[in-house]
Image: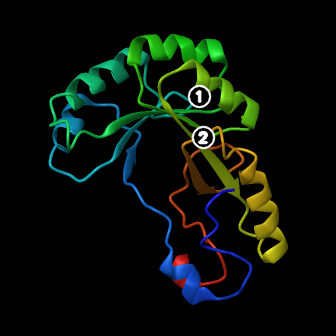
Amino acid sequence: MMNTSIHDGTGDSMSELRNPLPAAVKICGLQDVEVLKSMINLPVDYIGVVFAKSRRRIEPEQAAALRTVLFEWSAYDRPKLAGVFVNPTLEELEHIMEIAQLDVIQLHGQETAEFCQQVKQRWNAKVFKVFSFPKDETGPEADDAAIRALDTYDKFVDAILLDTHDPLYGGLRENVCLGANPCLC
């Protein structure tokens, strides 16, 4: 079962706030080695590189160069390299993993739980799955449906990322509201 501490259906917002979900910092869309070098002292957990169709898309060789820079950081502070994909094939992932050796494969499309399982079994990388939720779908029924959808991925992904709905994919730099409490939005 997924961690549902944000909304457990009891309506007790205080108990929901006592058990916050863990947070990590990811800077996404990096393309340049010099920009990455300038971040060496920042408390960043993940560096994201985009392989999906985007103006920030990079080639696997660029990701490999960024990975080399990451290994100049101390092992304690070194961010993990995350590749962002939208509906990739296993062959596409194979090609990129051979060159870039990503720490994380972030899936941002309609990838099924079974596909996530195949990715997890095939590569020594964490699998993050992104889910988008339209802003107009709110309330207990929508929350329960979302939790049921997320539960099918529970055994096959290492993290679930929530994003605002965009029919073309990709982060919109907008808030995702996690429940009725405005403190969580």
Query: On screen, 5 above or below 86?
Result: below
Picture quarter containing residue 158? top right
| Numbered badge on residue 120 | 1
Residue 54: image location, x then y, percent: 53, 34
Question: Residue at horizontal 84%, vertical 72%?
Answer: 141
Question: Residue at horizontal 20%, vertical 52%?
Answer: 42
Residue 12: image location, x then y, percent: 64, 88
Question: Residue at horizontal 72%, vertical 84%?
Answer: 10
Q: Nearer the viewer, residue 15 or 61?
A: 15
Q: Is residue 179 left or right of residue 68?
A: right
Earlier-in-chain disc, 1 versus 2: 1
Q: How many marks?
A: 2
Q: Residues within 10 Å of mark 1 (few under 14, many from 20)?
A: many
Dot 1: element:
helix
Residue denoted by label 2: 157
Q: Amino acid at mark 2?
A: Val
Q: Are marks 1 and 2 in contact (CB under 8 Å)?
A: yes
**Is residue 26 visible to the viewer in this orientation of the structure?**
yes
**Is residue 87 visible to the viewer in this orientation of the structure?**
no
Query: On screen, 104 above or below 134?
Result: above
Q: Nearer the viewer, residue 70 or 174?
A: 70
Residue 77: image location, x then y, percent: 21, 44
Question: Residue at horizontal 39%, vertical 55%?
Answer: 24
Dot 2: element:
loop
Residue 143: image location, x then y, percent: 76, 69
Picture quarter containing residue 56? top left
Picture quarter containing residue 169? top right
Query: On screen, 77 above or below 105?
Result: below
CA gap between label 1 and label 2 equals: 7 Å
Q: Amino acid at mark 1?
A: Lys
